[in-house]
Image (cartoon, rainbow, N blue to C red):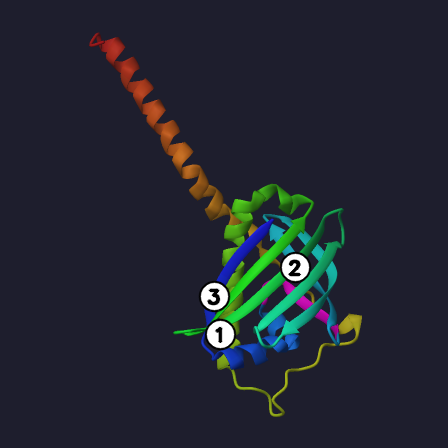
């Protein structure tokens, strides 16, 4: 499935481009994700999500390619559940353009996913993606407002498995529930209307007015 999202960051296109080049700084802004290793254009990482009481952890790898002229970054990602048969593969293309509020970042995701999250379908996945991308954008904005370290660089990725932090699960259930309730609102209203009509007819019959 293809998903499209966009957001604005309060920085010039050049500043935004430089930030996105630094995966070690940007990766912690993604909810539920931890970057484990980064060697050149290749990296590994983990993502943890939860739906209600069910948690799913994914471990994966990816590569990044950059087009400075177009201010475009492409991530090719693959992963699988650490305790399950689910898999995920994605090509994420982020393009930066000038915007009155700073820089507009358009993100196109070509996603192929199997397992439990696949049951949500494209509509719900798109709306859940909107919420996650908004959280990502909010964290990016905080990062841009935060002073840089003394040498202007972010802390390096921990090389030891024991030192790597466990990702904090992003709650898909909290994001999915409002979407499901909104989608169910119209059918529920129609069902309530039918019940009210049937009840009114029955009462009229009992009173002899019909």
Mark drawn on residue 89: none
Q: Quadrant of the C terminus?
A: top left
For label 3, count other residues whose C-alpha is less than 10 Å away and answer few (under 14), some (14-19) or many (20+).
Answer: some
Q: Is residue 167 left or right of residue 18?
A: right
Are the two marked residues, 3 and 1, in contact with CB atoms closer than 8 angstroms? no
Residue drawn where x is 37% and y is 30% of the image: 190
- Can residue 164 be spotted in the picture? no
Residue 14 belongs to the span the image colors magenta: no
Along the viewing direction, whichever of 5 and 68 lies nearer the viewer:
68
SS category of the residue bearing label 2: strand
Kind of element beneath mark 3: strand
Q: Quadrant of residue 129?
A: bottom right
The residues bearing labels 3 and 2 have C-alpha atoms spaced at a distance of 18 Å
Using the numbered discs, state the Cα–Cα distance from disc 3 to disc 1 in whole angstroms.
11 Å
Q: Residues within 10 Å of mark 1 (few under 14, many from 20)?
A: some
* Tag nearer the camera, 1 or 2: 2
On the picture, is 17 further left or further right than 159? left
Dominant SS of magenta comes to strand
Check disc 2 and report the residue beneath it.
Answer: 91
Q: Are circles 3 and 2 on residues that touch, CB within 8 Å? A: no
Q: Nearer the viewer, mark 3 or mark 1?
A: 3
Q: Nearer the viewer, mark 3 or mark 2?
A: 2
Q: Is residue 102 above or below residue 210?
A: below
Say which of 116 and 122 sits in front.
122
| Label 1: element kind | helix
Residue under pointer 3:
7
Residue situated in front as seen by the camera: 87 or 52: 87
Which residue bears the numbered disc 1?
A: 141
- Magenta range: 30-38
- Could you tell me which residue is drawn at 50 percent across and 51 percent down? 127
């Amino acid at each position: 499935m293809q998903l499209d999202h966009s957001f604005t960051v309060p920085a010039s296109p050049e500043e935004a481009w430089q930030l996105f080049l630094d995966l070690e700084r940007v990766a912690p802004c993604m909810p539920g994700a931890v970057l484990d290793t980064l060697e050149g254009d290749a990296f590994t990482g983990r993502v943890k999500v939860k739906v209600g009481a069910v948690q799913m952890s994914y471990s994966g790898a990816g590569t990044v390619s950059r087009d400075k002229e177009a201010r475009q970054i492409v991530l090719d990602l693959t992963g699988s559940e650490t305790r399950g048969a689910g898999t995920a593969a994605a090509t994420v293309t982020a393009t930066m353009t000038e915007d009155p509020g700073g820089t507009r970042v358009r993100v196109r995701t070509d996603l192929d996913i199997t397992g439990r999250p696949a049951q949500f379908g494209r509509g719900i996945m798109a709306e859940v993606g909107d919420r996650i991308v908004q959280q990502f954008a909010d964290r990016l904005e905080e990062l841009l407002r935060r002073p840089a370290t003394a040498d202007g660089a972010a802390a390096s990725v921990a090389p030891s498995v024991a030192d790597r932090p466990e990702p904090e699960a992003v709650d898909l259930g909290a994001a999915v529930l409002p979407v499901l309730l909104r989608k169910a609102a119209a059918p529920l209203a129609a069902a309530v209307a039918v019940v009210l009509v049937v009840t009114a007819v029955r009462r009229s019959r009992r009173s002899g007015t019909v």
